[in-house]
Amino acid sequence: MGGGPPGEAMRLTPTSFAATGEAVGRAEDDRGKIVAVRVVGGIVGEEADVRVGHRGGNFVHAHWVGSPAFSPDRVDPGCEHVEACGGCPWLHISRTRAHAERAARVEAVLAAAGVHVHVEPRAAPPNEGRHVVKLVGLDGPRGVRIGAYQPHSHEVMRISGCIALAPKLRALTRLPLLDVPEGIIRHLIARESSLDGAVLATLVVRDDHPSIRNLEGVFRRAGVGGLAVHRNTRPGDGILDPTGPTSVLWGVPRIREWVHHDGEPVVVEIGPTDFFQTNPVVGRQIWADLPDPGPLLVDLYCGVGAVAFALWARDRQVRVFGVEENPGAIERARATAARLGAAATFAGGAAGSVPLPEGFTGATVVLNPPRKGTSEAVRQQVDALRPRAIVLISCHPEPMARDLAAWTSTGWRVDSATAYEMFPGTSHVETVAVLTRAG
């Protein structure tokens, strides 16, 4: 069968999906060794003709070129960039199949960690685009090109109007070359409000060079309402530096999103480097599905307070204590609490290092940690509160499985787990687990 040299054709039937979205099958290479073949554009269970791209460390990369019999779940991707861009690896799979696969993966990852629970899939509304775009800057002799990385490479490609994005963000994928010296621009992040359509963009730079001030016309023509600069001089691929300075050059310094709507919408404000869900509609699905917190709520990794204010809006007698490391987000959460008249206190600092008030014993605790999950210090701090319930929100099943296994080993029970379609067209999944004390 071959299985190795670039350009070689082969036929195989994938048996699983990788976490990054490729369908994975096995083939014998030219040395008689069975190797894993990751097929971009493949579908588990569909016999496929593929063409080898290159070898990775432990597997072979290949591209789907055809099938003797198409899977009933194969659909037209509807995007001219699907083969070159790695942003939406599941556009060729029906949304019904894709979402079932996400939930099944989460269930399998949890089970492997000893947490056996049914994971309920929850689909996003149709035609709902992402309200955040993260692009990369590539230096060239005539300026900086803004685009997206191609799969498994650091080559940057231009995307002409990405269909996965909210409408106003698509213009940012068609920016002309930016007249900025080499070595300045690292990334471009932009968010479009689903409340009023305002767009706030942030250039992540190595140096706040004066030439950036000359880009106002370019960004205004692309529909941007405000431009900020965030300096990140750290090595590596991390987009933001938690300690890096951020300043707004012109226009709106933040945008607004609503988190709850019962008559008058409850609105929060989001700054240039604040965390907020990529898909606000699905975020509101999640918050609406969360159990009532009771009289006390502790929100760890609270960001600008989206979860806290969504739950507070159901019962405005709820007392809230939130913890967030981003100082700008804490400032905005406090301003929202003052504007709404909410009994909410927000403390700046890393979760686990900020003392939790004794008066919040028995609270419902919500955690939406970064990719690595929670620490032992956080889990011990939460347990010390003797909470009535724990709500864990995660965009990565593996750290969630570790966290749930740790809690279930100390007397907690997972009452429910729900997989949300936060990123249609991808294998990524947002999962919410609700825990209560066993017995």
Image: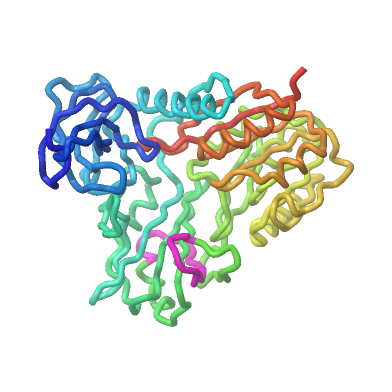
Q: Quadrant of the N terminus?
A: top left
Image label count: 0
Outermost residue, right side:
359
379 relative position to 113: left or right: right
Q: Nearer the viewer, residue 91 or 217?
A: 91
Q: Nearer the viewer, residue 328 or 41?
A: 41
Task: Using residue 271 as the reference point, say whether residue 121 is left or right of it.
Answer: left
Q: How is the image coloured?
A: rainbow
Residue 381 position (above or below residue 176): above
Q: Nearer the viewer, residue 158 or 309?
A: 158
Residue visible at 39% across and 52% down?
169
x, y (%) of residue 386? 82, 33
Q: Is residue 386 above or below residue 274?
A: above
Residue 346 vs residue 97: left or right? right
Q: Residue at x 70, y 45 (%)?
A: 300
Query: What residue range appears in magenta?
Result: 219-239
Left or right side of 239 for 312: right
The furthest residue to the bottom: 210
Residue 347 magenta: no
- Can the viewer see residue 250 in this picture? no
Is residue 142 visible to the viewer in this orientation of the structure? Answer: yes
Horizontal and vertical percent for residue 358? Answer: 88, 43
User: Looking at the picture, how far across and down is residue 280, in whole percent?
Assistant: 52, 41
Q: Is residue 230 magenta?
A: yes
Q: Tell me where residue 245 sits by quadrant.
A: bottom right
Q: Position of residue 383 (x, y in %)?
A: 78, 37
Q: Quadrant of the C terminus?
A: top right
- The residue positioned 57% from the left and 33% from the top of the image is 401
Q: Is residue 62 above or below residue 331?
A: above
